[in-house]
Amino acid sequence: MSRAAVFIDGAYIEFLIREEFAEMRVDFARLSQRLAANKELLRTYYYHCLPYQGANPTEEEAKRYTNKLRFFRTLDRLPRFEVRLGEIVYRGVREDGRENFVQKRVDMMLGVDLVRLATSGQITDVVLVASDSNLVPAVSAAKDCGVLATLYHGRKAGANEDLWTLCDERYAITDDLLSAVQLAPRREAHPAHETPAATTLSA
């Protein structure tokens, strides 16, 4: 039986939904099943970082951190879903005056999980929602184990060319795909009344 694991780069899909899909609210449980297609879904792994907080966080930093933590906890409660968190590192100020933050450990965690599942024979297929060339060695190792690799990427913010070429199948994330797993517009409600499936990147 074909068994797939879905690997989602949270920062990448967050960027796509913001820039290409007008902040569409997504049901990630349904999205995962749709990406796995007709294969058994072992698990979905979602990789991201909590927002940066300084030693004395501002009110805005604290609110952003709390909201994102709530969102990640909601995802983590979905069936066959696991959130892996890296770390945000402050790298000073760029030449354009904007603060520079860098994600650490995310690509490494994704690559390790991917290779571990492939080499142990737990999956026959890997589905990636990602774009980074750092994933090329891990995908190559998984293919050497006989695992088929499928890549989903943005229409404008496409994947790295080497990663795109390496994967066995590649699909652009379209309006039809996300519309099929779209949540209803947000209603004003107490957080305790929200269901675990009501997950949105704008949380």
Image: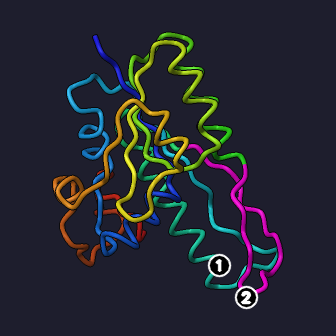
Q: Are marks 2 and 1 in contact (CB under 8 Å)?
A: no
Residue to which mark 1 is pinned: 61
Q: Is residue 73 above or below residue 115?
A: below
Q: Residues within 10 Å of mark 2 (few under 14, many from 20)?
A: few
Where is residue 129 shown, x and y percent of the image?
A: 43, 46
At 73% from the left and 88% from the top, the residue drawn is 96
- In the drawing, does residue 188 fall left or right of residue 95? left
Picture layout, residue 38 above or below residue 161: above
Which one is in front, 139 or 101? 139
99 drawn magenta: yes
At which x and y percent is residue 98?
Answer: 71, 84
* C-alpha separation, residue under disc 2 versus residue under disc 1: 21 Å
Q: Amino acid at mark 1?
A: Glu
Q: Residue at x 60, y 29 (%)?
A: 138
Q: Amino acid at mark 2?
A: Asp
Identify the residue under disc 2. Answer: 96
Q: Which quadrant holds residue 194?
A: bottom left
Task: Compare marks 2 and 1 and give the one earlier in the sequence.
Answer: 1
Magenta stretch: give its range.
84-104
